[in-house]
Amino acid sequence: MSMFDSTDFKIIKLLQENARMNWKEIGEIVHLTGQAVGKRINKLEEAGVIQKYTIDIDRAKLEGSIMTFVTLFLHAPHYHNQIQTFFEKTDLITEMYRISGDGCYIMILHTSSHQQLEETLADVLHYGDYRINTVIKTIEKKKE
């Protein structure tokens, strides 16, 4: 039996839509006091369900308009630690995933120009071959 009920899931959904919503506003929607909502949120945080509060940004307006998925095929197994270090120090790579199947890693790059993309890919080439897919349109899930 789950230690969370439907009200907890409603609170999570509301916070996913707007992490800045205050406890009183949430309470009005889920029919609880703000204090009761706060206790539930604390319980969700302590259980590790809520791990952090984030924001969504429009990267095209902030730092560039080219989003690229890079599938990396490492030259050798000893490059795993090196590519992870490269990821940590390269701000243009916003996410990186170790994968199974076709390739070793998928990286998400956000660049402001094709030249910046080319320069970053030249650095990636030290670790392995790559295949890129450039995003031409972002399709977002409709909010209820």
Image: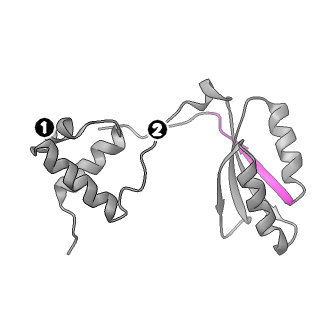
Q: Which residues are magenta?
A: 127-136
Tell me which secondary structure the magenta stretch mostly adopts.
Answer: strand
Q: Extreme top residue here?
A: 61
The residue that label 2 is drawn on is 55
Horizontal and vertical percent position of residue 117? 80, 38
Residue in view at x 17 percent, y 53 percent: 7
In front of the other: 137 or 82: 82
- In the picture provided, is 17 more to the left or to the right than 1? right
- Residue 66 shown in magenta: no
Q: Quadrant of the C terminus?
A: top left
Q: Is residue 132 magenta?
A: yes
Q: What amino acid is found at the position of numbered circle 2 in the picture? A: Ile
Give the labeled residue for mark 1: 28
Q: Residue at x 20, y 75 (%)?
A: 1
Residue in the picture at 75% in, 50% down: 89
> Label 2: few (<14), some or many (≥20) within 10 Å?
few
Assign a secondary structure to mark 1. helix
Q: Residue 35, how many percent across, how many down?
A: 15, 46
Q: Quadrant of residue 60?
A: top right
Mark 1 and 2 residues: CB-CB less than 8 Å, in contact?
no
Q: CA distance from mark 1 to mark 2?
A: 23 Å
Q: Percent from the top left, x then y, of residue 143?
A: 34, 37
Q: Is residue 111 above or below residue 102?
A: above
Marks 1 and 2, the one that precedes in the sequence? 1
Which element carries disc 2, helix, strand or loop? loop
| Residue occupying the point 34% across, 39% down | 17
Displayed quadrant of residue 83: bottom right
Identify the amino acid type marked 1. Answer: Glu
